[in-house]
Image: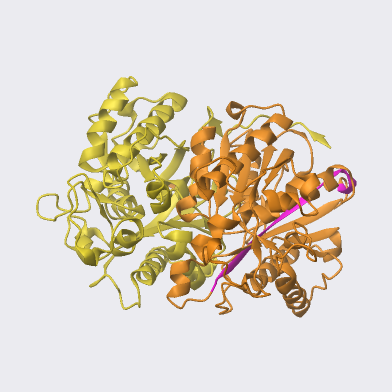
Chain colours: A orange, B yellow
Amino acid sequence: MATTQAPATRRLGRQTLAFEEPPVILAVAAVGGPMEGKGPLGSLLDEVEPDGLVGQKSWEMAEAYMLQRAVDLALTKASLQTSDIDFLVTGDLLNQLGASTFAGRMLDIPFFGIYGACSSWSEGLVLASALLDGGYAERVVVAVSSHHDAAERQFRYPTEFGVQRPPTSTWTVTGAGAAILARSGTGPRITHATAGRIVDIGEKDPMDLGSAMAPAAADTIAIHLKETGRQPGTYNAIITGDLGNVGKPILEELLVQQGYDCKQQLDDCGLHVYDQKKQDVHGGGSGCACSAVTFCGKIYPDLVQGKQGRVLLVSTGAMFSPTSYQQGESIPGIAYAVAIEGPAAMGGG
Amino acid sequence: MATTQAPATRRLGRQTLAFEEPPVILAVAAVGGPMEGKGPLGSLLDEVEPDGLVGQKSWEMAEAYMLQRAVDLALTKASLQTSDIDFLVTGDLLNQLGASTFAGRMLDIPFFGIYGACSSWSEGLVLASALLDGGYAERVVVAVSSHHDAAERQFRYPTEFGVQRPPTSTWTVTGAGAAILARSGTGPRITHATAGRIVDIGEKDPMDLGSAMAPAAADTIAIHLKETGRQPGTYNAIITGDLGNVGKPILEELLVQQGYDCKQQLDDCGLHVYDQKKQDVHGGGSGCACSAVTFCGKIYPDLVQGKQGRVLLVSTGAMFSPTSYQQGESIPGIAYAVAIEGPAAMGGG
């Protein structure tokens, strides 16, 4: 009954997975709502929905529709069908993964539901990469979504109330992103991934999630650099999910305290989705879709075209619920890091 | 930039993972509430809490405490510490994985949050097995929880209302289960796992989840048998999570329609946790903890002691939310199957 196996070889340290046959990202697709269409990423999205309901009965089902649509568009770009995909790894912010579930019902692809709040995008990339590199699948789709109006009424106040938002608050992105990962093919590759820990510094303001998540991002990035033995300069960019203009400077400082000066590399998806001057989003964009649409609309094409060689994508999540907040709990954060290389980095190390 | 890898070898068909170095379940632990302590599994639980609050301020934090406690007890039984564990794969029913998050905060183990409703237990076993067999970790803990009062007020009515429950309703188990999986060691082994699809037959009654989940269980079991080429008799038992006495006969019939007579093998965790005659639970037990405490309290010891040789554990989930239900949506189901062998089955096939 006892078994003795060789030690695990596809990892570095405790938290970092090192892929022997780095999975390829064959194709990606991003869908956004009307406000996302008007932002700087608008022209880079594969589809911009003219209104937030997208012809559905509710914002929640609109989100499920956009999630399914992103998967369909990515499949079309890769000339694949749902039957070519082994697993759908998916998450969203709705209670009980409402968008993922109903998108999964429409897509009929074997399903792994995950929840890492707004870090779900990179959490999904980690698990999908392990399923592929480990030899359990040929192709896996990772897809996540969020919806501003559905999220606001679930987490804070219904948008119809017109509650004034403080400057630290971020704007949940309405949209969805999908990536098709495969064992073989052409495209940027995921070489390493670092899973996050729950980090909670006691921050309690649901209108300031950037401050709550920054320590988790710092923890994951520092562990990633330590376990891989890499320096910040190994990456053209280290791109967090949705810290915004409040959380990003905190992250910079926390990393300096841990001995890593990443100022040159640090960037945040939340600062790309909207025009910070013209669009009234305060701290920046947020939500599962924030890092997903920024990756699919901008980072992935930059990797393919050689504008970026190697990036570390670090989607960040605030793991609170309205219940935990109302019960006086602080807001735990988490972050997952994924190292991705385009042709400009190939051969490097 | 193009890569060509050998096809994925650790799988059978599209949905079934076949582990080359089957992960070992080193130790398990189950914690239950007062009502679970009075049921037939009571004496088999590692700890029975004298009241549902367990000294916490809320049912939600009581659930988080029990989840953490189950992990701690399992670690003690295996003479391990949290620092010996690479990843915690965990899920629960609370909005935004409230119990998992706050247990994860206390445990400080790198964290993968998953959501498969009451199927989260076997979903977690699938993903943890892939992380181990794939070579990404030495030891992974899978842990899930549920809490009757926390679940009722979130999904249906606060228990203080005293709403009359129909005979088809099940009773969400208050408790938590944890299993320590490892690449090497002594214990039952996970040889195969089959991921589920979202299956929705249009059932809309949140007081009859057994009927909503039975088709998903049938789908996953039939696919598992087809992809592995196994017959129902390969297993001493095929044990679903929480179909209860309403869903189990539906599953039996659906499997017969697909050419599999599993009547001799089929069992359901929901029929083990409570005394169906003396405890007023109607359809049986349910919740993430239902299959977890039944596995940890009964099935695992049976495997270790050779009372069972090979079992297929099929935790079942109803992927609805109060929002989707109130918006008129039907209840999608999902099920994950995990094939586990004790010494009595070793050498067989």
Task: Reply above or below: A330 against B333.
Answer: below
Residue A278, x across and y down, in percent: 79, 63
Q: Is B34 in front, or is A2?
A: B34
Evaluate whether residue A322 shows in this view.
yes
Residue B170, x across and y down, in percent: 24, 49
The residue shown at (39%, 30%) is: B219
Residue A272, x across and y down, in percent: 78, 58
Evaluate whether residue A18 shows in this view.
no
B265 left or right of A29 in image: left
Q: Quadrant of the C terminus of chain B?
A: top left
Residue B243, x across and y down, in percent: 28, 42
The extreme left residue here reads: B278
The residue shown at (35%, 78%) is: B57
Q: Is A284 in front, or is B39?
A: A284
Report the predominant secondary structure element of the magenta stretch: strand
Among the 4 quarters of the image, the one containing residue B256: top left
Residue B80 inside the magenta-drawn segment: no
Residue A341 inside the magenta-drawn segment: yes
The residue shown at (45%, 39%) is: B191
Task: Reply above or below: A277 against B336.
Answer: below
